[in-house]
Image: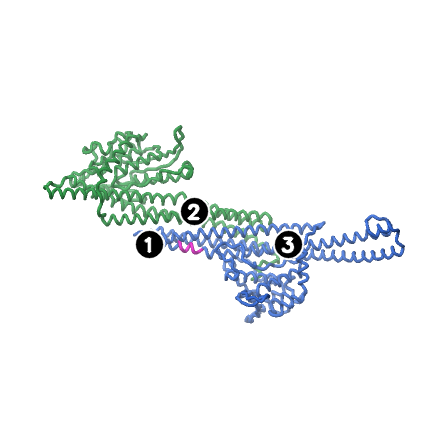
Amino acid sequence: MSISAPRGLASSGQKPITEILHPLSAAEEPLSPGPDVTVSGGRDKEVGLTNGTPVETPSPASASVLFNRLQLDDDLDSDGRDPYADTETHDLFVTVDDPKKHVSTMETYITYRVSTKTTRIEFDLPDYSVRRRYQDFDWLRTKLEDSQPTHLIPPLPEKFVMKGVVDRFSEEFVETRMKALDKFLKRVADHPVLSFNPHLNAFLSAKDLNKRQGLALLSKVGESVKNVAGGYKLRVRPPEFCAMGEYLDTFNQKLGTIDRIAQRILKEQSEYLTELREYGTVYASWAGSEEELQRPLEGVAGCVTTCCGALEDMSENMGQDFLPVLREYILYIESMKNVLRKRDQSQAEYEGRLEAAVLRKQEDRTPIPAEVEKCQDKMECFNADLKADWERWQSNKRQDFKQLLTGMADKNVTHYEKCQAAWESLITLLQDKQTEDKTSCKSLWEIRQ
Amino acid sequence: MADSVSREEVAVISNTDITSTESENNIINTMVERGTALLRKLEINVAEAEKRTGKNTVNMQETYTVYLIEIRPAETEGGTPAAPDTLWRRYSEFELLRTYLLVTYPYIIIPPLPEKRAEFVWHKLSADNLDPDFVERRRVGLENFLLRVASHPVLSNDKIFFLFLTEEKGWRDAVLETGFQDKADSRLKSLSAMFRVKNPDKRFTALKQYSDELNSVISQLLRIRARVADRLYGVYKVHGNYGRVFSEWSAIEKEMGDGLQSAGHHMDTYAASIDDILEEEEHFADQLKEYLFYTDAVRSVCRKHELIQYELEMAAQDLAQKKQQKEELATGTVRIFSLKGMTSKLFGQESPEQKESRLAALEQSIQEGEETVKEKNTECQEFVRAAWDDIEHFKEQKDKDLREALISYAIMQISMCKKGIQVWSNAKECFSKM
């Protein structure tokens, strides 16, 4: 196969983000040292945004190139333990951890350490460690969305939190957010196309993300996208994409219901816990007025306390691990719906242009312009990317929910195991005393024998 | 006191209430001596309950429940169990029996009856007296009452008790004939009377205090337990919603569908399991309630002792006064004010004959007074001895019963945990197959 290995930017190590070519600039020329955008078969294709300009990203965006890249990757050593993919590369590992609070005169914010380990040649060094804040992640995501419109970008945790309702600096909030950011980065790093995006590269390696120019240019992009795409309306969505849309709607609904149920359970458990605690203290106070029964009653009080602790642990877990993941998927569904809409736009544009060109041809024999073909290519690429991402997403979703629900069941089992152990040790304590008892007095149970 | 019926058979007592878990943890030697003479000869059950309608004392129609008491002679070796003698009793008759016992044996802590109306209920539990679950728990409580009386070294010998078990029709008359009603009225009066004892018996004071504490703490425990039950019910039932949503979700999934669907079923099972769990826990609540009501009986005994002590003190005080009067009369000194003394001062001394007759009357009175004091003293001592015997017995019984109640409660909790582990492990397996 006459395919050369895809290569990203050569010296992305310390390059400020402004030097990376914007998607709208210098459209036609390939970037040195020559990212390969050609497809096997030799056809010169340019892939780009809906405004017609090719994407500057060196990574191939068409399906067939993607396929070829995957084929190539089969030769590499793949890490079998990764539950996400069997044939994708595992030469880029990212982690988000170590949250730290920064206090300045203007504001207070949290940064996280982003560590990277890689063997990819697109990176100058094998290891990186930088500090990023939520804003930076948000920047990255926006960049990815704009530069890879045909792909599904993983969601970020909620941006805005109501001040006064949620403490942005509490340990639980920071921990939950950090886990979501970590997951976001890992999903991007695992994506066969997104992981080669130069913005990701910059994010992972640049000492200082200078985002201002990027943001200014960003708004231009947004407008141009709107101008072109706004004119066309889709008539018929193909059935396979209809099915996707329907699935997403229903899935969204079910996740919402599960979220509500989980929250309700947490509420009920919290109220139960309050009563249970008081229950335990009554046994302890009863023990105070007894002699023979003092130790058994204290034992019961202790058991109840242990059960309270076990329940508290489980509830905390559910709040920190279960609910955030559910919410994340709801955001994911929103992203997917957006991508579907964009695909619809691309189809609408093509069909619109085609119709106009056909009419013109009929009138004055003007040949169908090349742009129409380009539109068709764009649309077909979009469809292919989307289908590929959909499959990926479905597979990941299955793994994620399997893990999530298994985890939930596991936590419940552990909770009951802890409680059972406590009560069983109490019984041994209580029954030991019984064997020593030799009085002639009878308990009711003995009378009934 | 009643004569005990003499029969030759050895007692075997049936237990209609034991659970397998209780017997699993039982370490009691079944060859231990059976206790009272009565129980050695008879088997007592409260077997059933039935609804009846009839006219009450004010000639109005009412619905009430009657309970079947079965008496069997204890099993002989190798012989077939004889058919039981049975009679029906309603709750009010049990109450009458108990009142009789309270009056007749004021120094004994009389076992309590199960509650008349359902209290300490959590929201799913019925407070209706005719509800079958309530009736069933009451049946058990009535049987416990009879067994406790039958196993009591003093009460088991009572003739009226025996007639209660054997004479359906004539029993009421027999009870009334004992004339206990009069004593009942005066007892009620004395219980509510306010008086102060000069030298309270420290042991009884401590016992009353303990009894009050126990009453308070068990009430508190029962109240909170009902709230805990309510909350736990809510937790389990909400999980049932998972069953439905997993089922709906499974409809849009391909590979995940089966796992989700089966897991949903397990969630339904989990939600449903709480009903039995809480029903079983009511048994524990009933055991606590019995001792809650026992504290009233203990208080009763303490009060009765106070009354006797008070009467003794009054009699002694009265005697002392009379002796004082005699001394003054004999020596002529007036230390205590008396109308006679004043009038004789004002209107002149009385004649020696008058003085003599007064002295004689006083002597008589003093002798009677000394008799009274002696009697009261004996009564008091007897009461204290008999009561304290019973109180020691009660304390041991209470410790044993409550310890066993706690053990069976722990067993129930373990069973609940095991069920939970089972269900969630099953669900986990379904999830892992998604």
Label 1 sits on a secondary structure element that is helix
Chain of the residue under label 1: B
Residue B282 visible to an observer of this rendering: yes
Badge 3, how many Cα within 10 Å: few under 14, some, many 20+? many
Three-letter amino acid code of the residue under disc 2: Leu
Label 3 near label 2: C-beta < 8 Å?
Answer: no
Marking on residue B299: 3
Q: Respond whether the residues carrying marks 1 and 2 are from the same subunit.
A: no
Q: Which chain is blue?
A: B
Three-letter amino acid code of the residue under disc 1: Asp
**Residue A87, quarter of picture:** top left
Q: Is residue A132 left or right of residue B216?
A: left
Q: Is residue B265 left or right of residue B14?
A: left
Badge 2, how many Cα within 10 Å: few under 14, some, many 20+? some
Q: Which chain is green?
A: A
Marking on residue B258: 1
**Residue B192, quarter of picture:** bottom right
Residue A171 visible to an observer of this rendering: no
Front residue (pair A117, A204): A204
Judging by the rendered image, the residue that carries numbered circle 2 is A266
Number of the front mark, 1 or 2: 2
Boundaries of the magenta span: B267-273
Q: Is residue B182 left or right of residue A374?
A: right
How far apart are the two marked residues, 3 and 1, measured between alpha carbons? 63 Å
Residue under the image location 38 percent in, 55 percent down: B265
